[in-house]
Image (tube, grey):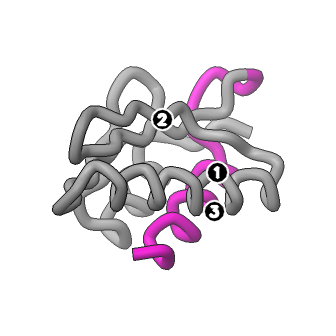
Amino acid sequence: MKLSRQEIGNALTRFPGWGWENEALVKTFSFSTYMEGVQFAVRVAEEAERLDHHPDMLISYRTVTLTCTTHDAGGVTERDVALIERIERLL
């Protein structure tokens, strides 16, 4: 079930740097090298597979932008919040 704006706002207070854009949770991560970003993206992909919930990922040199949304719900759900919680633990 899609979360309300208030529920999304409450969730975002727990995850600094994450924003809400176009019905998705979004954050850009910066790394010292291109390969550090790629390795981070691989770890995110492994967590996403475990949760069977996959973010969009954009790797651009030393940055990785993650976009998390539940397409079939038309926005952010608890699945997205659970995923970003796991992503934050990877850092």
Question: Is 63 situated left or right of 10 in this image?
Answer: left
Q: Which residue is mark 2?
A: 57
Q: Which mark is first along the chain, 3 or 1?
A: 1
Q: Position of residue 38 (x, y in %)?
A: 43, 50
Q: Which mark is first along the chain, 2 or 3?
A: 2
Question: Counting other residues with Cα less than 10 Å from the Cα at mark 1, is it few (<14), some (14-19), or many (20 or more)?
Answer: some
Q: Which mark is residue 82?
A: 3
| Callouts 3 and 2 close, C-beta under 8 Å | no
The answer to which image quadrant residue 88 occupies is bottom left
| Callouts 2 and 1 close, C-beta under 8 Å | yes
Q: Which mark is first along the chain, 1 or 2?
A: 1
Nearest to the observer: residue 19 or residue 52: 52
Which amino acid does the dot numbered 2 rest on? Met
Magenta residues (range) = 72-91
Q: Position of residue 28 (x, y in %)?
A: 27, 46
| Residue at 61 percent of width and 58 percent of height | 83
